[in-house]
Image: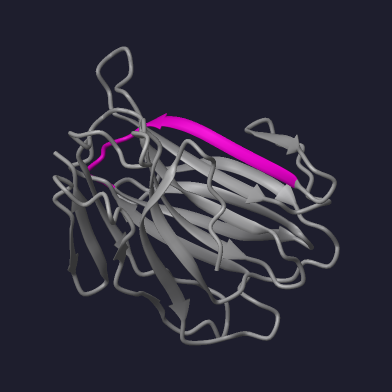
Amino acid sequence: MALAAPHTALASIISSWEFTGNPSGGLRDVTFPFKIDGTVHKSGYFFSQQLRFQGITGLTICGIGNQPNGPGGESIVRAQFISDYQLGTTTQDSNCRLVSGLPSNDTITCTVDFSGSYGAMYNIVVEQVKGTTWKASAVDTSNGKSVHIGSWTLPPTAGGIRPNELGYVRYQGPMSPGMCPPPPLPRAEVIIFDPFSQTLGAGTGHINEPFNFFYPCEGGIGYSAQNVGNGYHIRFGS
């Protein structure tokens, strides 16, 4: 299964997620929880999950990333949603922009930066609004605050969300000529929790063991992944 990534980024740690159920119309919502406590307060990482919709081939990506602190020293979290390589996708959301490339490619990118603790768990929620229109939000589970990421409309052939896909930690910093990040790699620490859904018949969500895609760039990375029962605690960098 291919990963869509720009040339300036490396899909560094790859995992997969799945639900035990498979509703005939697909999932009508899915929630991906993340906690990035321990990650440096600079830009450079995107902690994400991919998903696909029934009836179309385009790839969708959602997640959170680190950012430099705000002018008052407050922690800033970036939440992002990308509907990638799907002709006919549209948006009228002020948080989103449409990038039309090749005749078969339309990409919607929705981004929001907000003040929030890196010690909180954030739920990235993707849910159906009506028909083929969907929205994404980031929910701080420590206080219940929900931040709107964006909304978009898929082509008429689109169905619900398929019950399995990949996820990854993407490093977006500088690369050496061998496509390895120059040392020292900035510190990243994330707990990627099992997904869940309110869709009838979805069953239980599960994250599978991550794979270190930094290989052969492993020297000095300090990678580890620990099963915490309801997800994986991933650490690397310094």
**Magenta stretch mostly in which secondary structure?**
strand
* Quadrant the C terminus occupies: top left
**The stretch drawn in magenta includes residue 82:** no
* Quadrant the N terminus occupies: bottom right
Horizontal arrangement in the rendering, residue 125 relative to residue 205 (left or right) = right
Residue drawn where x is 67% and y is 67% of the image: 53
Residue drawn where x is 56% and y is 63% of the image: 51
Give coordinates of residue 77: x percent, y percent: 37, 35
Give coordinates of residue 3: x percent, y percent: 53, 57
Horizontal arrangement in the rendering, residue 181 relative to residue 3 (left or right) = left
**Magenta stretch?**
106-120
Q: Out of 237 and 27, give the one closest to the viewer.
A: 237
Q: Spot the residue most to the top.
A: 71
Horizontal arrangement in the rendering, residue 10 relative to residue 57 (left or right) = left
Q: Out of 201 and 165, give the one closest to the viewer.
A: 165
Give coordinates of residue 223: x percent, y percent: 18, 55
- Splitting the image into 4 quarters, where does residue 181 fall? top left
Residue drawn where x is 66% and y is 50% of the image: 84
Horizontal arrangement in the rendering, residue 53 relative to residue 49 (left or right) = right
Whether 175 is drawn above or below 24: the answer is above
Q: Spot the residue most to the front.
A: 177
